[in-house]
Amino acid sequence: MILTLFIILAILLAYGFLLVALFYLLAGEFFGAPFVPTKRDYLPEIARKLKLKKGQRVYDLGSGNGRIIRFIAKNYPVEAFGIEVNPGLIMYSRLISRLEKIRSATFKRGNLFTEDVGKADVVFVFLLSKTLVKLKKKLLKECKKGTIIVSHGFKFQGMEIYLVDKIERKVFCTYYYRL
């Protein structure tokens, strides 16, 4: 009897965990993009091309698990900000930053369409093309002249005149735009 109750409880907990995990994974789909982390192997090359200087501000809109922000904050003397709608991913990003003792990385729950990016020197995004179409107007309006926009995975349609560099890959090229 006790074993049967234990098995039933374990099954209910497992299903509950799966439902919560599914919600967190799908939440991004409705707000910009599904959660797909940038490959760790790509981070050094993506960051190196930015030629980051002390005191610059780097924003990641839709920061997911915070991988790019943590990498940049750990390796460059900049202020790094991750903006993410998914509270589970924000908690994860903050936890890993604390464990890795990264003090210059800040993670905030927010909407990439309403977050002010006017102070950014670099804005990183890994979003679907349909989301980039919506985001383009906001970035052109809010970002100062000289801001670098990095789009990993997909091109910004209609921003070809700002394209200054590109990392070619079979899957998920990285595009650099300077406003």
Image (cartoon, helix red, strand yellow):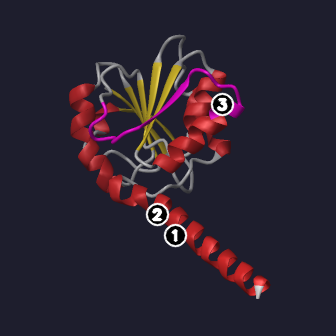
Neighbourhood count class around disc 1 (C-alpha, 10 Å): few under 14, some 14–19, many 20 upward: few
User: SS of the residue at dot 2?
Assistant: helix
Is residue 157 among what the camera can see?
Answer: no
Reply above or below: 35 against 43: below
Is residue 114 among what the camera can see?
Answer: yes
Q: Residue 43 or 35: which is nearer the viewer?
A: 35
For the point 28% across and 41% down, which residue is it? 113
Hey, which quadrant is residue 16 in on the image? bottom right
> Hey, what amino acid is under mark 2?
Phe
What quarter of the picture does the C terminus occupy? top left
Report, in whole angstroms, how far the alpha carbon at label 1 lies from the one at label 2.
6 Å
Q: Can you identify the residue that label 2 sits on?
A: 23
Residue 102, percent across and down?
A: 65, 25
Q: Seen from this angle, which residue lies furthest top?
A: 54
Residue 37, percent across and down?
A: 56, 50
Q: Residue 135 or 153: which is nearer the viewer?
A: 135
Circles 1 and 2, Cβ within 8 Å, touching? The answer is yes
> Hey, what amino acid is under mark 3?
Arg
Q: Can you identify the residue that label 3 sits on?
A: 98
Report, in whole angstroms, how far the alpha carbon at label 2 lies from the one at label 3.
25 Å
Q: Can you identify the residue that label 1 sits on?
A: 19
For the point 36% across and 52% down, which residue is it? 32
What quarter of the picture does the N terminus occupy? bottom right
Left or right, residue 165 beside residue 171: left
> Hey, what amino acid is under mark 1?
Leu
Magenta stretch, residue numbers:
97-115
For the point 43% across and 44% down, which residue is it? 62
Left or right, residue 152 beside residue 72: left
